[in-house]
Amino acid sequence: MFKSLGKMAYVYRWIILALWVMISFLLVSYAFKLPNVLSGDGFEMKKGSYAEVQKIASEEFNLPNNSVIVLFEKEKKVEYEEFIHFIQKKLESVRNVEGLVSLISPYDREEQLKNNVAFAVLGFDREFNNMEDILRELKRKLKSEDGIYIRLTGPALINEDMNKASQEDLKKAEMIGIPIALIILLIAFGSFVAAFIPIVIGLLAVSCSMGTLYFIGQYKELSIFTLNIVPMIGLALGIDFALLFISRFREELKSADIKGATAVAVQTAGRAILFSALCVILGLAGMLVIDVEIFKTVAISGVVIVIFSSVIALTFLPALLSIIGGNINRLQILNVNESGESVWHRFSKFVMKRAGKLALISFGILLLFSIPIFQMKLSIPDATALPKKYDTRIAYETYEKEFLGKNHSEVLMIVRMKENNILEEESLRQIENLLQKLRKENIVANIDSIFSIKGDLNYQQLYRLLHNDETRRKLDPVIDRLVKGNQTIFTVRLNVDFDSEEAKEFVKRWEKNDGQMEVLLGGLPKFNQEIYDEISGNFKYSLLIVFTSTFVILVIAFRSIVVPLKAIVMNIMSLIASFGLLVWIFQEGHFGFEAVSTIALMIPVFVFGVVFGLSMDYEVFLLSKIQEIYLKTGDNDKATIEGLSTTSRVITFAALIMIIVTGAFAFTGIVPVRQMGLGIALAIFIDATIVRLLLVPSLMKLMGNVNWWAPKFLKKLQQNVFYEY
């Protein structure tokens, strides 16, 4: 099949090239529009109590869908009265902004005003991803003046700045990664033509993928992190696929014509590319079982970029090389010894002679790197994920420091009676019992409810007040805000942080439905608890899908049971080691990185999904060569030495490119993107050095012919297949 595909690519090379020019022209024009259809950080669940409470609070209790915090801060030279007048004037100017449904000023609540700083909360009836025109108007009307600064923050502004920062990060990463990748390719090939083509392939794959995702974004909500995921994976994978393919094409040109070289390159490198792509797709697709939008976004975006990278490598690239032919070696800048077999052959023999010791040393290093993983702390990114210079982050941190304190969180409770109206005596008695139990919780600071409307009342006193015509008229505005038929809403303030274990346990414990009363919980603690539970509860299924499907694909590829099992185990070990290093670098602040308190919640899942597939790229390439020689000679040691010596150079350059392209994102502004870029780069580095160059050949030597054990039916299949690597 692959040989036929290679011949077809040669025969129809001009047609294939013309088709790709038309496809890319269409899709690239839409790629630039992709940021316009991206919204939010993707931490969203369509089901669960949090979403239900948000809907009830908005639709039935008229709470805002979205809020903007306006932070006022003055210099010492500004008089207090001038500061107060300025706040009044500015807040008055926004009262007619479209969509404004509530305004809580510092004069409504004393705790919102201090000597030099104050804040107001503007509530809007729009979703945070539909606030662009409102934010533009707010920024126009709320401008700082001499000595008094205004900064805005809130979900919509954080989303807007995340989008802006993502685009800046993309440009910065490309400015770092692409030139260095080109230098590495020049060192690898020596020829400018051969070095430039992989860059073209990577950029083409990224552009076509982003154009396709623009159309997907019309029907499916995509996270702003798509702008980082697609270039990160696309450039790395596209360049790597092209590197492997061009290396084989140039090698075949030494002994064959252009048509033959193209056919063999597709038959050999093309086959490795397809199996690698399948492994990456499976690693990404495993995230789809986690019902959180950001994981679905990454899975969909990743699968799109892998499909384009592999299809371009199997069609456009061989067609292009068929046209270029011997000119692939033009513009020779460096004289390169591409075989390097003498150095790598000596290295291979060195590893094989000391297989036992090197295996133990490799395992020891991986275990050492893994130790910090036990200190890993995970959290959902907030405004602090933005670069420090952004006003949105400055406002958020000032607001948190001055008004919220270290430990703070609010839980929204919807209490729904099954049979009775909330204002009936029996309903009030049950609600009072609930409140009394809540107040006994050590982490409960205070509760705002219908029992708080006129002092500390018991249910009988409240019932009499509500059924007295005179007092009822006075209380009606408050009652209308807090009670709707058979349900009421109240706020529980906790003295622990919203992402603490205590807060998550609290919201899980107090949600109930006993047949008479239903209690639904919302707020950030519930949001965090549901997100954490969804990930921890379904990640095991994601792992099972990835491990099982990857095992089956590798069994088909290598007709062995032992080799795929070893590949999966070693991938897991290298990933755990990279997570340990990630904790050591970011949480403890090493290598010049600022220490942060947590790792972004999605990073372990992302890195696992991406790297587990990407690392199979080298696994397939190395083991395919070893298998080819083993099938010819039946000598496991000879196959391992020759396979390692002939592939190590290409693996090293391929890994270097992937490390550079993904690692470039470690120097960007958004903290989760930095963590993801460095996490992938570390995992690839560990995988391509300690695992592929030391641990794999050592275990191949120690296990001998056991490596190739397989059931009889697989052996029969193997006899009918000849791999020309």
Image (cartoon, rainbow, N blue to C red):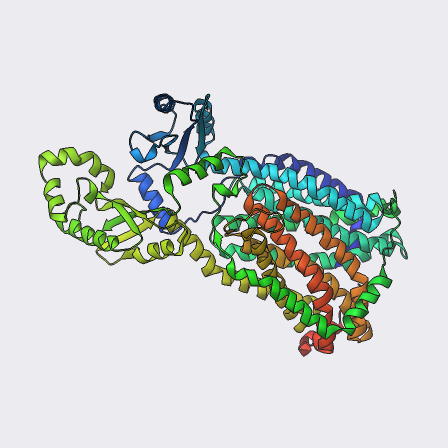
The percent coordinates of residue 64 (x first, y second) are 35, 36
Q: Quadrant of the N terminus?
A: bottom right
The answer to whether residue 204 is seen in the rendering is no
Residue occupying the point 69% across, 64% down:
691
- Tell me if 127 is positioned left or right of 356 in this view: left
* Up-down relation of residue 75 to residue 405 (above or below): above
Asked if residue 350 can be seen in this view, the reply is yes
Question: In the rendered view, does 134 fall on the left or right side of 10?
Answer: left
Depicted 693 relative to depicted 677: above or below: below
Up/down of 503 relative to 71, above or below: below
Seen at 47% across and 31% down, the residue is: 132
Q: Report which quarter residue 532 is drawn in.
A: bottom left
Q: Nearer the viewer, residue 654 or 547?
A: 654
- Tell me the quadrant of the picture where the C terminus can be found: bottom right
Task: Choose between 692 and 363: the one closer to the eye.
Answer: 363
Measured as percent of width and height from the top left, residue 443 is found at 31, 53
| Quadrant of the rendered image containing residue 467 | top left
On screen, residue 108 versus residue 709, left or right, reads: left
**Closer to the camera in the image, 503 or 82:** 82
Coordinates of residue 531 in the picture (x, y in percent): 44, 53
**Residue farthest to the front, as pictured:** 77
User: 588 or 680: nearer the eye?
Assistant: 588
Tally of marks:
0
Percent across and percent down for residue 62 are: 30, 37
